[in-house]
Image (cartoon, helix red, strand yellow):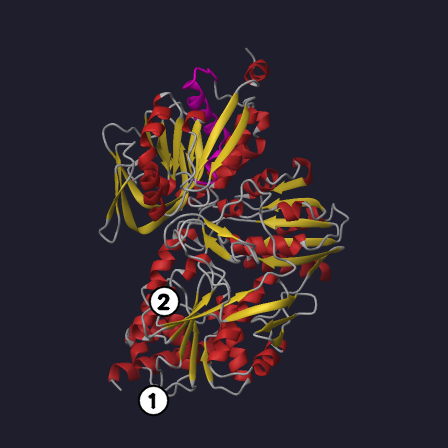
Amino acid sequence: MTMNERAETAAKEKLNILWLYPDVLDLHGGRGDLMGLAHAAELLGLEPEIKRVDGFDDEPDFDWADIIWLAPGEVRCAGIVADKLRPRLDALQAALSRGALLAAIDSSAAAVAKQTFRLDGSVFRGLGLVDMDCREMDQVVGNDIWFALPDGEEVMAIQISLLKLELGEQAQPLGRVVYGYGNDGKGGEGAVQGSVVVTNALGPVCVKNPRFAARLICKALAGRGVELTPDIAPELTQVEDMSFDLIRTFIHKKQAG
Amino acid sequence: MSLRFRCAMLAGKLTACLILLIDKEIGTRLPGVVALKVDPQLLRHIKGVTRENTVFVTGTNGKSTTTNLIAHALLSAGRRVVCNFEGANLESGVVSTLLKQTGWDGRLKGDILLLETDERFLPIISEKLPPGHLLVTNIQKDQVQRNGEPDLILKKIASVINKDVTLYLNNDEPNSGGLAQLAGKVVRYGVAPHSRSFNKNDDFFAVTQPCPICGSPIRFTTYNIDNIGPFHCSACDYASAPRPDFLAEEVDLESCRFTVNGEPYGFTYFTPYFLYCYIGAVAVARGFGLTAEEISSSFLSFQLPGGRLEDVRAGGHTIRYLRMKQENPETVQSAIDVIAADHSEKILLLGLDELVDFHPHYTNTFYTYDCDFSGLIDSDVSHYICFSGTVAYDAALRLMYAGVPREKITILPTNDDATIVAELNKHECANVYLITWLHKYEHLAEYAKKHAEA
């Protein structure tokens, strides 16, 4: 089946994105990822719909969602979000069990981790959806990050991290760092456990890397039996691809000193 | 006076003299760096400094303008003010300022010490030189490579506030309002909604920010500038005061007037952003006993440090430069708003570039996704030119995501001035706006000037 044929077939498919607490998780241009996800969905021939869950008293419709999105926010807010979601954890886990994808970006990793150790000695609990601890660092990690996914797709993004991510045995890295810091400076970037995905990548990562966004979408739709491959024709991503090339050249210059 | 302090003063003052003789461009901080090497506690030993006569101005945006407005008002009224007008706001810069404005005996040559203070260095400076008066302009997203998140800055500022401090707070800015409970006295200033106030009801992707008290979403009744306006928390009782101590009302941006508690004030810089600088200056200056007439009169003669940047002539084009600060969405938004207010046909030169403030340099442009470009898109921009040796394509992507058709964007993956001007010359429209870093503007202006002379 060609991409166009698949797009026509898939045009009937909707992609439902639940954007949790956008006013609370408000940092680093994170709202751009929602725009990027929607755009990538359109490139795949899907019909994206985004629903915001604004207030902590609003009930998130996890049953409806293919993708549940936690954008980057302040570290303290990740703890608050975890506390607000905890009473709804059963519904969230039911959605994850049927294959909905939960993505946590940057510091929002702390919301899905087991616990986060802060510099002042305090500790707050996450939802424990990923076998991972977060540890606040005394310096901000700010740099380009370039990493490769297990299938070889490369992602170019930005990292601004206050948290070091320490993965346990049940969580796997999302990718392998080609350049940059990643989780802890040891080569791993992000985390995957079941249908929960964590990444340090900003940019917005889904804008700069439509094929990364497409992979998230495909993983989410696979949960409800929609088989889709994340192919996007190169002529549709020329600007993104040239951005990648230009920044890769810049990184090579940095590496050369 | 200790020997070490005397030696530090001597070393610092001599360094300042040498800089004057050799090269004034060496920098404003060097005398302070040298003096602090000799006596790291130098700030503790300055004479004539008390809490009562010490004013610090800190925050993310508007520090320099607010500080200079306050200084100008106080000086115009005949007060003797020591101030770091040049914006040297790190510890070494503050020491450099004090070296210039203290005698050999270490005594301050003024009655009021007014310092713009970098928010990250505020705890270090305050430990040695505790302020009695602290004005916080705002706490916003800024320079994330070093600041990380607003909460980090909030904590640094909070660490210096105690019951001996009079805190001047922007009533319309949610983050800094959370500091009020720490201070002995709080003076709030704000701006009433005006003709350029707006809302974001139609923007699906609009986001606000978390409440500094409980973390729930903040709701703005209206925005006077981006992320600043009357607000309330959606969950707890945290809110801007309905009537701050100093409220700019009857704001007329055409005739440049507002009133505060019924008294008229004039001003000269008429973009809404400046209103908060003016009203903050009113709050402090009134606290030091100035009259409304004295303050208003000083505002009318006030000029921004460095003056207005000149328009650049390039071929048949007039390029108007709008300054942006690194990784600071509010300054980009202010630039966008200025352009959007001009409804005549125009070209936009957008020169985002890699960040070169700290190591490692990197290619962050995500702060532009915290900005709203819709006003720009609706303001008759006939063509966009994105240039940068690293992030030209990312800048173009931002515009495309704002709805600009690809064919209206030229992407130049270079910083070469000749290439940029050559591209500009392909377009007839004479009205050109430029958003980029200051150093790039200076390069381009120099090139255009030479080119015109040739």
Reply yes or no: does residue B410 show up in magenta.
no
Closer to us: A103 or B451: A103
Does A14 appear above or below B187?
A: above
Please, which chain is the residue tagged with disc 2 on?
B
Q: Secondary structure at mark 1?
A: loop
Q: In this orientation, which residue lies closer to the viewer: B188 or A151?
A: B188
Query: What crowding class fits label 1: few (fewer than 14 Cα within 10 Å), some (14-19), or many (20 or more)?
Result: few
Q: Is residue A256 visible?
A: no
In the rendering, at what x and y percent does residue B63 appear? 48, 67
Amino acid beneath label 2: Leu
Q: Indicate whether residue A223 is drawn in magenta.
A: yes
- Please name the residue shown 56% across and 74% down the image: B261
Which portion, as a residue range, is magenta?
Answer: A202-228
> x and y percent of residue A106 in the render?
38, 41
Task: State whether residue A163 appears in this view.
Answer: yes
Task: Tell me the residue that label 1 is attached to.
Answer: B105
Q: Quadrant of residue B104?
A: bottom left
Q: Looking at the image, how many numbered discs can be counted on the residues? A: 2
Task: Name the residue rendered at 64%, 48% in the picture.
Answer: B375
Q: Going 58% across and 38% down the picture, which residue do you hit?
A: B401
Q: Tell me, yes or no, whether dots 2 and 1 are on the same chain.
A: yes
Residue in front for this viewpoint, B245 or B115 = B245
Identify the mark at residue B122; answer none if there is no mark: 2
Quadrant position of the C terminus of chain B in the picture: bottom right
Q: Regarding mark 2 in the picture, which secondary structure is present there? A: helix
Relative to the observer, which residue lies in front, B307 or B74?
Answer: B74
